Image (cartoon, coloured by chain):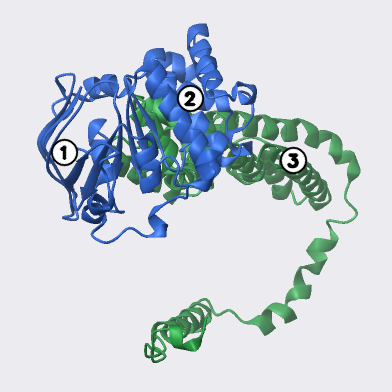
Chain colours: A green, B blue
Amino acid sequence: MTAGAVSAGQRPAKPRPSIVAPLAVVAFLAITWWAASDELGIGFDVFELLTNLTRGASILAEFVPPDWAFLDRTWAPLLETFQMAVIASVIGCGLALPISFLASRVTSPNAFVYLLDRGILSVVRALPDILYALVFVAALGIGPLPGILALILFNIGVVAKLLSETVDAVDPGPIEAARASGGDRVQTVRWAVLPQVLPNYVAYSLYVFELNIRASAVIGIVGAGGIGNLINEQRRFFNYDNLAVVIVAIFVVVILIELGSLWLRRRLV
Amino acid sequence: MIRFENASVVYPGGVHALKDLTLEVPDGQMMVIVGLSGAGKSTLIRAINGLVPLTGGDVTIDGVSVRKASPKQLRELRSRIGMIFQTFNLVKRTSVLNNVLMGRLHEAGTLRSLLGWYRGEDVEIAMRSLERVGIVEKAYVRASNLSGGQQQRVGIARALAQDPKIILADEPVASLDPPTSHVVMRDLQRINRELGITTIVNLHFLDLARLYGDRIVGMRNGELVYDGTGAEADENVFRDIYGRSLTADDLMGEAAAAG
């Protein structure tokens, strides 16, 4: 194409740079300074952190050598943690599936159900799992049951959020096809939407299962069963050499489960 | 018979896509709608199965009003109207057979289809539909593994599985190359002639329209500007429809038609 063939439009002037980006950087720096300052914030000081780093060394020294004989006592609570995670994942992810479809504009029957479901999910996600565990332990007593209930709520919050956003982004073509063939809402979700999001759903479920293993270490500290109970008990008696064994055991189990779920996800997605 | 009676569609944005349209399509006819993008072709087709609600007038199918139909009646009506799309609209992650079985959703019922327990006769109908478009050997292949032409034939099989009285095809060949376009158009023509299914096709290639349409309807700005046979649709008629002279861009090309 010759230059003459192009219509001689005027080149546009370069637009003026936006003021938003520099303002955002200034705001970001100001908030960080505010959070760390001595007068207004928590008085965070990197040098203090470095000079005091050695203070904990005497306590850390008590972690080594780990008392490997204690390993025998970690199996039962670890198994309980694993079982809690399995039950919470199955129930939580199962409930999250229909909840996700009601929480997406694409599949929700109307605006009321959509907003109600979104609202409930926001409330569920507002509290961290350990607070749910505290509440359920208070209501039901110490043991794995309140832990499982806390994890179920946590799982619904995570999976429904991720999955409903995935549903928002599905290809609308098959949905139109299902509706055009006379399918009702349930059939449309089942055959036009679910096959599109199924690999994501499986991946999210495996992800929350991993999170459950980790979370149950923490919620056990407030009495909600599993390996956390053991941590709490050993910590209270300053048995740091036993605690070291528990930490290593959790570390190994979490890594193994992550590897397993990674392998599964690769095959499924 | 499909009857448009002063049918109008105004979209929420204010676009008047269908203006006071009156039109009759007798049973068994192969009608092609031509017009520029935005002329209202897709709206007209979707008004027939209620995917686009009318804002004025009515569309009746064998005397049954689409506009006044309850949700349940509308599903009933739709179950006898197959639809074929420009982008095929298959679920790519699942098998060809599962896609075709989507045409059996209404007959299978909610609970049965929810669990995937289709009756043997539903599967049999799906398989026969695949045989009719010549790709039954792909029944258990993932839809994403098929070529564009094969995917559109799955789309046709899905429509056939509904045992439809009417087939609506919205730009069915716009995503396909010329030789494949002719294969798909011939499939539609054969189905129309052998099964007597009323077939309404949106096309934007005029030579395809003339080649396959028993009747050609021209649309411009939501209004009917031509209604006649392909043979009568000459240069002047297309100038009316397109608002300008015919160019090579409006033709798919005759070379491929022989193939």
Q: Neighbour class for label 2 at 10 Å: few (<14), some, many (≥20)?
A: many
Pointer 1 with pointer 2, Cβ within 8 A: no
User: Residue B105: which numbered mark, if any?
Assistant: none
- Residue annotated with mark 3: A257
Quadrant of the image for the N terminus of chain B? Answer: top left
Q: Subunit of mark 1?
A: B
Q: Neighbour class for label 3 at 10 Å: few (<14), some, many (≥20)?
A: some
Residue B117 appears anywhere in the view: no
- Residue annotated with mark 2: B157
B201 vs A231: above or below:
above
The answer to which image quadrant residue A178 occupies is top left
Q: Subunit of mark 3?
A: A
- Residue annotated with mark 1: B54
Camera-side mark, 1 or 2: 2
Identify residue type, mark 2.
Ala
On the same chain, marks 1 and 3? The answer is: no
The residue closer to the viewer here, B138 or B31, is B31
Identify residue type, mark 1.
Leu
